[in-house]
């Protein structure tokens, strides 16, 4: 609505100028309107640049979140493997103790 009103004002002022009603007031108004139009266009371009920047940052945040998630999953996989290795080590250690005890018992029985 504001853009349409501004455009109508510009058209009226341009008609007045073309009809010969060129006075300082009309010229000042035209300059003011042109300045406002330029500022509005600059603001619109700045808004577009900022929106693009926000989209890039959002995409980067998404990629980083995915990387963090993947790193967390890898960490969990490594913890599980470590737990398995610990269990295997305990089992091996237990078997070794049992075997050593069996050897000691056999040695004692042979000594008797």
Image (cartoon, grey):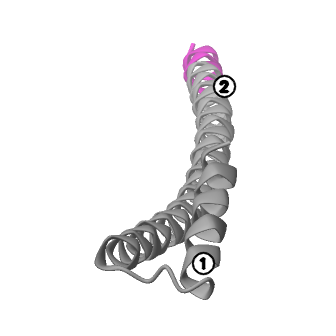
Name which residue lies at 58% across and 26% down. 90
Measured Cα–Cα span from mark 2 to mark 1: 94 Å
Observer-nearest of 4 and 23? 23
The quarter of the rendered structure image containing the N terminus is top right
49 sits left or right of 26 in the view = right
Which residue is nearer to you in this view: 85 or 4? 4
Circle 1 sits on which residue?
14
Looking at marks 2 and 1 on the same chain, the residue that comes earlier in the sequence is marked by 1
Confirm whether the magenta stretch covers residue 111: yes
Q: Nearer the viewer, mark 2 or mark 1?
A: 1
Q: Which residue appears at 54% of the width and 86% of the height? A: 20
Q: Main secondary structure of the magenta part?
A: helix
Q: Residues within 10 Å of mark 2 (few under 14, many from 20)?
A: few
Residue 1 to residue 11: above or below: above
Q: Say above or below: 2 vs 38.
A: above
Q: Position of residue 54 (x, y in %)?
A: 54, 56
Residue 84 badge? none
User: Quarter of the image holding residue 12?
Assistant: bottom right
Q: Which residue is mark 2?
A: 91
Task: Find out whether residue 75 is within the magenta segment.
Answer: no
Q: Farthest residue toward the front? A: 20
Is residue 27 or residue 74 the one in the foreground? 27
Q: Which residues are magenta?
A: 102-112
At a point 44% along the width and 68% down the height, the residue shown is 33
Q: What percent of the width, then of the height, locates residue 52?
A: 60, 65
Seen in the image, is 87 located left or right of residue 42? right
Percent of width and height locating residue 94 = 60, 22
State the SS at label 2. Answer: helix
């Amino acid at each position: 609505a504001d853009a349409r009103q501004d455009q109508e004002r510009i058209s009226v002022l341009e008609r007045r100028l073309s009809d010969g009603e060129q006075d300082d007031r009309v010229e000042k108004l035209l300059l003011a309107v042109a300045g406002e139009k330029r500022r509005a266009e600059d603001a619109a371009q700045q808004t577009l640049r900022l929106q693009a920047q926000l989209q890039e940052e959002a995409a980067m945040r998404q990629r980083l979140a995915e990387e963090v998630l993947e790193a967390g999953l890898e960490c969990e996989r490594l913890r599980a493997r470590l737990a398995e290795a610990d269990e295997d080590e305990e089992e091996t250690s237990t078997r070794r103790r049992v075997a050593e005890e069996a050897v000691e018992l056999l040695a004692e029985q042979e000594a008797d």
